[in-house]
Amino acid sequence: MTYTLLGGMWSISITDFLHNIILIIGLIFLTFLLYQKTPDLGAIIEKQETDFFKFTPQKHDITSWLTYLAAWITIGLGSIPQQDIFQRVMSAKSAHVAGIASFSAGIMYLTVAILPLMIAFLGVSLYPSLMSDDMLLIPHLVMKFTPTGIQILFLGALLSALLSTTSGAILAPASVLGENLIKPMMKNPSDQKVLRIIRLSVVLVTLSCIYMAVKRQNIFELVGESSAFGLVSLFIPLNAGLWWKKASSMGSHLSMLLGLGVWGYFQFIEPLEIPSIWPGLTASLIGLLLGTYVWPNPPKAVE
């Protein structure tokens, strides 16, 4: 929270950049060590179940396919209106830099992400007992196979990367609160006043995050829900604002409220057989269309 208050997006970008370089080097090193200890990779692959490497759902019914597609779009599309992509793109110094960074990050998603998958596959194959605590599988492998110096470097970078990711997640809603919700209700506020409001919002969001972390211990579920949150409430109004000239402010507000409300109802109160993001996205789209056509934007005055 402290360096987010003082340095903002610039401090998060620098720390993320350095920590991720160290993490990638550590992952490559650990993958190489595990591969060396693997007696016969082909034999391990052959031992897996028949459908272990199947890319599509095992059942070809509508529920299986909706669940499968939901897994793709929750992170793939849900990350676009959040700090993962949108915050970084808007912080770039030019559209050209933002474009190159986005495509480079997409390529790295498909390459660097293979490393932890390989580590988990080889580690569990060599040491099945690691599955008893799968949330800490990679840290256990680091402690088991790497020298002390690498352990300090890797785990330190991992902790720092978690802090950097958390700071980015804190800054995004705090900026929205200060810049998009509170500032429009004020009459000609100075930049210093808006900055103080955003910094206060950082503190409030941090306290909320601490409460959520204490109440919910499964980080995988929290990450999934945060991406689903952005997908059902922000993805459709964001794209409508970018690509549809008729989209109105009321349509965007209704889209966010209905999408979030319907998703929350089916996620926490009345779960369905299909993922709750589907009714949430449907409600978000309906809210956008309803608000836009019933309460359109007033025509612009001709100068």
Image (cartoon, grey):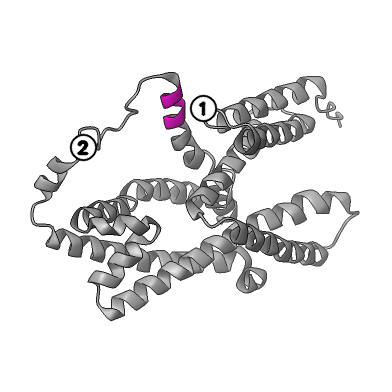
Which residue has dot 1 on it?
Answer: 273
Residue 267 lies left or right of residue 38; in this view the side is right
Q: Amino acid at mark 1?
A: Glu
- For disc 1, the neighbor class at 10 Å (few under 14, some 14 to 19, many from 20) is few
Quadrant for the C terminus, please: top right
Image-quadrant location for residue 242: top right
Quadrant for the N terminus, please: bottom right
In the rendered structure, find residue 49 and report the number of the disc placed on it.
2
Residue displayed at 60% across by 29% down: 281
| Label 2 – label 1 distance at C-alpha | 26 Å
Image-quadrant location for residue 36: bottom left
- For disc 2, the neighbor class at 10 Å (few under 14, some 14 to 19, many from 20) is few
Q: Amino acid at mark 2?
A: Glu
The local secondary structure at tag 2 comes to loop
Q: Is residue 65 magenta?
A: yes
Which residue occupies the foreground of this view, 101 or 202?
202
Which stretch is magenta?
Answer: 63-68
Residue displayed at 30% across by 72% down: 143
User: Overall secondary structure of the magenta stretch?
Assistant: helix
Q: Is residue 290 visible?
A: yes
x and y, in percent, of residue 258 in the image: 71, 31
Residue 239 against residue 29 in the figure, above or below: above
Residue 56 lies left or right of residue 93; in this view the side is left
Mark 2 or mark 1, which has the lower sequence index? 2
x and y, in percent, of residue 35 in the image: 16, 58
